[in-house]
Image (tube, helix red, strand yellow):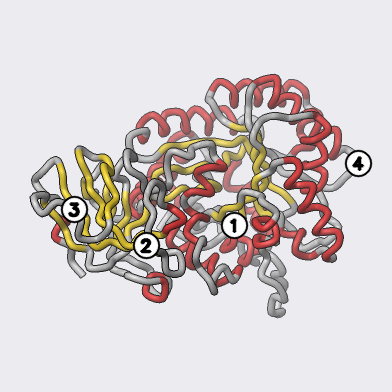
């Protein structure tokens, strides 16, 4: 289907008529919903959504494009990515596809190649892809082992400024928490993160020092006004219970900042009673959880010559039922932790629905790449369609869920401030000079 607004109406005000919207991502408009979808005319004035009206009620005097029932979504929020790792697969592949293989391949690549020029070029390539797909905010974790934290955060600051009018960017310092024993390193890391307006992160592991590590992390975050986003229990070992330890530390320290935990895979491997007690503690502590379904299914339960026995994802439905803010995200892209992907939230959504059975019904599913991640990253003003919000929209020919989820939606149209953007994706050949052909 070709829309007339591919050449935008030559007017300050126009109507996207007969649109189908995911109700979970709409505010300030009430209409009967069918499996979470509502119909509306979207009035756009000077780059803003000025009104949402029942179909046919917008003035006939306005320039208009008839979507004929096609979907209109807000631009997406991708709340857990790794822009610094992206696209290194051809340079340093994970030959056995395992988690340990990924760690070693990334370590070798980082130590050999991650100069400012290398990191910047790969970041820019990733952002161009995400922008073309319709993403308006990305949170990225940055490997922060000394001295990489200084290199990558400086590059990130430059890239964030260059992209501020297209994609809002947030950065999290990612490091093995056992490195906190190096007081000088940790103090320098906290200073870099604070000065760059980032978040503290880290990889949690079971061990006798875990409680001390978490307490010190949250004290440092509190003292410096930082939020926290952690990599948690990315394993099929049911004995990995660092999620519970994180929640306990948040409560014990009275930490008031936002705390996000990514992955939390082992929660789904524990017996129901233990898992439920952890879920209740997570809810009490006010944590948010981000699941990375594509990467987790790729890495978890991978063994030579053996079919995997589980899907790798956390207890997403149980966490959401407990009132915990939950979302999904891209995670890694064409690197040793995930050999595929293109920072396309539509792909992430489609796969999340299939992997985690978020269907039947799909009434609130759209929230997981729109309003929920926007709330988690502290930007409730984006990821939704509402009167007064920017006309940052992604338009699809698909009219209902069966159409939306059955194709990659490569014919989508992206509007930013009411203007159609160029959706041309960057050519992988552009990376040949840094990662090889």
Task: Tell whether 165 sits left or right of 178.
Answer: left
Q: CA distance from mark 2 to mark 4?
A: 52 Å
- The foreground one among 87 and 25 is 25
Q: Reading the chain from its start, which is encountered first: label 1 or label 4?
A: 4
Q: In this figure, what is the number of numbered marks? A: 4
Q: Quadrant of residue 22?
A: bottom left
Q: CA distance from mark 3 to mark 2?
A: 16 Å
Task: Tell whether 358 sits left or right of 31.
Answer: right
Residue 194 horizontal/vertical position (percent): 59, 23
| Quarter of the image that includes the C terminus | bottom left
Residue 359 horizontal/vertical position (percent): 54, 71
Q: CA distance from mark 1 to mark 4?
A: 28 Å
Q: Are marks 2 and 1 in contact (CB under 8 Å)?
A: no
Give the label, 1 or 4, closer to the camera. 1
Residue 296 horizontal/vertical position (percent): 63, 62
Q: Reading the chain from its start, which is encountered first: label 2 or label 4?
A: 2
Q: Which residue is mark 3?
A: 58
Asked whether residue 392 appears in the rendered view, the answer is: yes
In the rendered structure, find residue 38 and report the number of the disc placed on it.
Answer: 2
In the rendered structure, find residue 208 and report the number of the disc placed on it.
Answer: 4
- The foreground one among 250 and 286 is 286
Dot 3: what SS?
loop
**362 above or below 139?**
below
Q: Reading the chain from its start, which is encountered first: label 3 or label 1?
A: 3
Dot 2: what SS?
strand
- The foreground one among 406 and 98 is 406
Q: Reading the chain from its start, which is encountered first: label 2 or label 1?
A: 2
Give the label, 3 or 1, closer to the camera. 3
């Amino acid at each position: 289907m070709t829309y007339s607004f591919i050449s935008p109406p030559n007017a300050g005000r126009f109507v996207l008529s007969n649109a189908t919207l995911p109700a979970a991502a709409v505010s300030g408009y009430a209409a009967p919903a069918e499996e979470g979808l509502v119909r509306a005319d979207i009035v756009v004035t000077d780059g803003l959504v000025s009104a949402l009206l029942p179909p046919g009620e917008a003035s006939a005097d306005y320039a208009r494009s008839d979507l004929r029932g096609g979907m209109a979504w807000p631009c997406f929020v991708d709340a857990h990515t790794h822009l610094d790792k992206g696209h290194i697969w051809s340079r340093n592949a994970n030959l056995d596809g395992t988690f340990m293989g990924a760690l070693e391949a990334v370590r070798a690549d980082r130590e050999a190649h991650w100069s400012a020029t290398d990191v910047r070029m790969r970041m820019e390539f990733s952002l161009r892809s995400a922008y073309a797909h319709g993403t308006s905010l990305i949170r990225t974790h940055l490997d922060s082992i000394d001295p990489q934290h200084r290199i990558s955060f400086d590059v990130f600051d430059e890239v964030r400024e260059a992209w501020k009018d297209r994609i809002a960017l947030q950065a999290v310092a990612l490091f093995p928490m056992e490195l906190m024993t190096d007081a000088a390193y940790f103090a320098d890391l906290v200073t870099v993160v604070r000065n760059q307006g980032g978040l503290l992160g880290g990889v949690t592991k079971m061990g006798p020092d875990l409680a001390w590590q978490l307490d010190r992390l949250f004290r440092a975050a509190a003292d410096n006004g930082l939020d926290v986003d952690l990599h948690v229990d990315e394993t099929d070992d049911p004995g990995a219970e660092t999620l519970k330890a994180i929640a306990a530390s948040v409560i014990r320290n009275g930490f008031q900042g936002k705390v996000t935990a990514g992955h939390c895979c082992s929660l789904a491997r524990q017996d129901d009673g233990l898992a439920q007690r952890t879920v209740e503690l997570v809810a009490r502590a006010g944590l948010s959880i981000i699941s990375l379904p594509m990467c987790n299914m790729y890495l978890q339960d991978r063994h030579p010559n053996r079919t995997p026995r589980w899907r790798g994802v956390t207890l997403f439905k149980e966490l959401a039922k407990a009132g915990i803010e939950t979302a999904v995200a891209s995670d890694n892209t064409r690197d040793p932790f995930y050999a595929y992907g293109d920072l396309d939230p539509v792909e992430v959504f489609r796969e999340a629905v299939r992997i985690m059975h978020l269907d039947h019904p799909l009434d609130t599913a759209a929230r997981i790449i729109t309003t929920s991640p926007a709330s988690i990253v502290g930007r409730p003003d984006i990821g939704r369609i509402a009167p007064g919000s920017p006309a940052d929209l992604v338009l699809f020919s698909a009219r209902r869920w069966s159409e939306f989820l059955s194709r990659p939606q490569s014919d989508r149209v992206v509007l930013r401030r009411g203007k159609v953007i160029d959706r041309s994706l960057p050519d992988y050949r552009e990376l040949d000079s840094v990662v090889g052909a």
